[in-house]
Image (tube, rainbow, N blue to C red):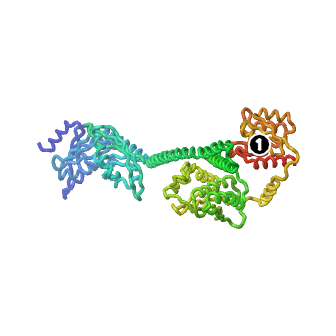
């Protein structure tokens, strides 16, 4: 029995459909057609042609009859029939809609045997896996996080689009490279150790590092690495997911800087509070000490006058310190208001010069105070109080730290700005302190590096805040031992009408005190503090006024109702029970137009506006000098009479 017949009998026992066919060879030895010789199943069960009777028929005839074209693996089996060998095909039958794994081999020239194994379910599973893989790859590629898979030695086997975008390379360029290429060399040993430990710990871990990209773009990357196990529960790969945490790292660094700055500020604040305690106790010691000495009947008139001057100077020093504390409190709480009005800059600067000139002549004989201002008048819209405070702080600073030479103040026009300056030839500021001189609670003696020059550390901070409120900026130029130059700007905002200036000057002239009232007027002093009441009563002893006193708001209302001869009321704002402003409102509701002057020890911006809204005609802040109080009373009585 020849080999062909042997295989025909053998395939009858195959669990898969088999087909035997013989090649028809031309003179050149090339297979040009086939004849089907046998099968182990009913020919109709073969998923080849619609014709079921195929045995002893030619392949070409069946193809022509089917009109569906040939069968790929039969077409390619001609060489096998002639030369021998074996081939494998994956074939989809249109007749059955199934997939087959076809093994074609030649047991004997020119015969061929084909074994058809139904793999439809297997192929369907593969297709489903491919779809799932495509889905998850598509999903991973839409993620903003970097996703990768790597070998335990950090060789990359998969990366998503976010990874490629971050490193600025294509996937083909990245695959096969090591993740360590992205990690700073100083971190290599630690990362490799942690990755190797995954097989033991079996726990994910987080790792962050700096990554320098093209163009020196430095970013912070945070990785989360998880192990991937094979069927034998051995480490097969490592899954990595990373995100850019640069903004988070920068925020953390900023928080650390802010914390350090806050701690530094607290140190300065504590030192400044201790210094302010000293500043307050020093004038208080002078006031109390010399006040006690004044009780000694043995002191002469000359010493008495000297002691009184010391008490007065100490009181002014203490008042300035209290005003600074109030200002900084208002600034910190955001309750500092800005009150704009017309200002003649030359007049304001000249007034500051005339006020400080005697101080320089008295306290620093070796220091001259110079003034440099333009000849033309400059009228702008700004806040008079804050401008005066700024210049006062800068001039006090210059007076404090300049022992010889000169101090120069002035301003100049620079485009849309007015640039003011105060220059001195004092001790100057060390370079490391120059950027901190405007910091709140920064001590003046630290800046000056001289223990005998003390301050509350608030003046320049208030100056910076006030300049900012006026819409400008402030800066300093200084050299140790050479002096300092402080500059600040305010906008050159021009008033709308020059006629307003004339009206204001006319109003100012009409408000000036003229002759005293010939008739004795009656003044109701509403004051709960007995020492303030006593002081005002002493002031009034040589005035052409009669003063009566009320200690509460209720008492003030009773005296106002029962004494129609009262011509003016000095109303303390803060009273026990009914406040002074409430008393004022009740008087106005009764229809009375009597002049009411509010007096307050608060001295806080905004109190004046509250007093006016309540119905007061004028406002004075304690402590007030005898002459200023008299001028205020005269002005309001005259306005009421007229």
Answer left or right for 3 relative to 377. Answer: left
Q: Give whichever of 240, 538 is nearer the camera.
A: 538
Q: Quadrant of residue 173?
A: bottom left
Give coordinates of residue 495: x percent, y percent.
73, 59
In the displayed structure, 92 sits above or below 411; it is above
| Residue lying at 39% horizontally and 55% vertically, measured from the top left | 213
Q: Position of residue 424 (x, y in %)?
A: 58, 62
Taking 137 as reference, is 360 left or right?
A: right
Question: The N terminus appears in which quarter of the rendering?
Answer: top left
Please tell me whether residue 180 is drawn above or below residue 533 in the rendered image.
below
Q: Is residue 311 visible?
A: yes
Q: Position of residue 276 (x, y in %)?
A: 57, 45
- Can residue 435 be seen at all in this image of the molecule? no
Residue in the image at 82% along x and 32% along y:
558
Helix, strand or loop at mark 1: helix
Residue lying at the far front in this picture: please name it. 298
In the shown orientation, is residue 579 left or right of residue 6? right
Pointer 1 local density, CA inside 10 Å: few below 14, some 14–19, many at least 20? few
**As rendered, which of 201 and 551 lies closer to the eye?**
551
Residue at the far left in the pictured view? 1
> Which residue has dot 1 on it?
538
Q: Viewed as shown, does residue 150 lie left or right of 488?
A: left
């Amino acid at each position: 029995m020849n080999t062909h017949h042997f295989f025909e009998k053998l395939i009858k026992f195959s669990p898969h459909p088999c087909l035997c066919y013989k090649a028809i060879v031309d003179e050149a030895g090339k297979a040009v057609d086939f004849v089907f010789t046998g099968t182990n199943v009913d020919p109709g069960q073969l998923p080849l042609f619609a014709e079921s009777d195929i045995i002893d028929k030619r392949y070409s005839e069946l193809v022509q009859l089917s009109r569906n074209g040939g069968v790929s693996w039969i077409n390619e089996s001609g060489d096998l029939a002639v030369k021998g060998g074996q081939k494998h095909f994956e074939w989809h039958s249109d007749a059955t809609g199934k997939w087959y794994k076809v093994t074609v081999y030649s047991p004997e020239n020119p015969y061929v045997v084909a074994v058809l194994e139904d793999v439809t379910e297997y192929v369907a599973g593969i297709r489903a896996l491919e779809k799932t893989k495509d889905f998850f790859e598509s999903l991973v590629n839409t993620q903003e996080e970097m996703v990768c898979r790597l070998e335990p030695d950090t060789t990359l086997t998969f990366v998503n689009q976010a990874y490629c975008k971050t490193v600025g390379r294509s996937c083909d360029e990245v695959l096969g490279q090591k993740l360590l290429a992205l990690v700073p060399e100083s971190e290599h040993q630690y990362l490799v150790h942690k990755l190797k430990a995954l097989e033991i710990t079996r726990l994910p871990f987080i790792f962050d590092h700096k990554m320098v990209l093209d163009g020196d773009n430095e970013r912070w990357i945070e990785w989360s690495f998880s192990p991937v196990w094979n069927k034998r529960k051995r480490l097969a790969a490592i899954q990595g997911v990373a995100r850019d945490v640069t903004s988070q790292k920068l925020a953390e660094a900023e928080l650390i800087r802010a914390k350090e700055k806050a701690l530094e500020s607290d140190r300065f604040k504590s030192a400044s509070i201790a210094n302010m305690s000293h500043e307050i106790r020093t004038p208080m010691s002078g006031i109390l000490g010399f006040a006690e000495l004044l009780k000694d009947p043995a002191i002469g008139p000359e010493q008495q006058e000297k002691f009184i001057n010391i008490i007065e100077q100490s009181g002014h020093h203490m008042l300035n310190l209290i005003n600074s504390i109030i200002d900084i409190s208002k600034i910190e709480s955001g309750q500092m208001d800005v009150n704009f009005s017309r200002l003649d800059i030359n007049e304001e600067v000249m007034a500051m010069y005339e006020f400080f000139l005697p101080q320089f002549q008295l306290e620093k004989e070796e220091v001259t105070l110079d003034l440099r201002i333009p000849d033309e008048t400059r009228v702008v819209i700004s806040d008079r109080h804050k401008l005066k405070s700024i210049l006062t702080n800068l001039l006090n600073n210059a007076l404090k730290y300049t022992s010889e030479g000169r101090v120069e103040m002035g301003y100049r026009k620079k485009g849309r700005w007015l640039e003011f300056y105060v220059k001195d030839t004092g001790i100057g500021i060390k370079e490391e302190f120059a950027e901190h001189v405007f910091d709140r609670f920064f001590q003046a003696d630290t800046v000056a590096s001289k223990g005998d020059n003390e301050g509350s550390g608030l003046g320049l901070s208030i100056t910076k805040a006030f300049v900012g409120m006026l819409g400008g900026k402030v800066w300093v130029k200084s050299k140790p031992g050479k002096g300092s130059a402080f500059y600040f700007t305010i906008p050159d905002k021009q008033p709308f009408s020059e006629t307003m200036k004339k009206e204001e000057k006319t109003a100012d002239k009409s408000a000036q005190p003229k002759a005293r009232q010939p008739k004795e007027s009656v003044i109701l002093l509403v004051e709960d503090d007995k020492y303030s009441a006593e002081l005002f009563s002493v002031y009034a002893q040589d005035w052409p006024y009669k003063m009566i006193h009320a200690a509460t708001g209720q008492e003030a209302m009773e005296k106002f109702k029962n004494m129609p001869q009262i011509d003016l009321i000095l109303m303390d704002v803060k009273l026990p029970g009914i406040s002074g402003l409430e008393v004022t409102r009740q008087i106005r509701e009764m229809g009375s137009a009597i002049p009411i002057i509010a007096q307050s020890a608060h001295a806080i911006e905004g109190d004046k506006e509250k007093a006016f809204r309540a119905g007061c005609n004028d406002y004075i802040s304690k402590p007030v000098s005898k002459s200023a109080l008299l001028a205020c009373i005269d002005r309001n009585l005259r306005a009421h009479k007229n």
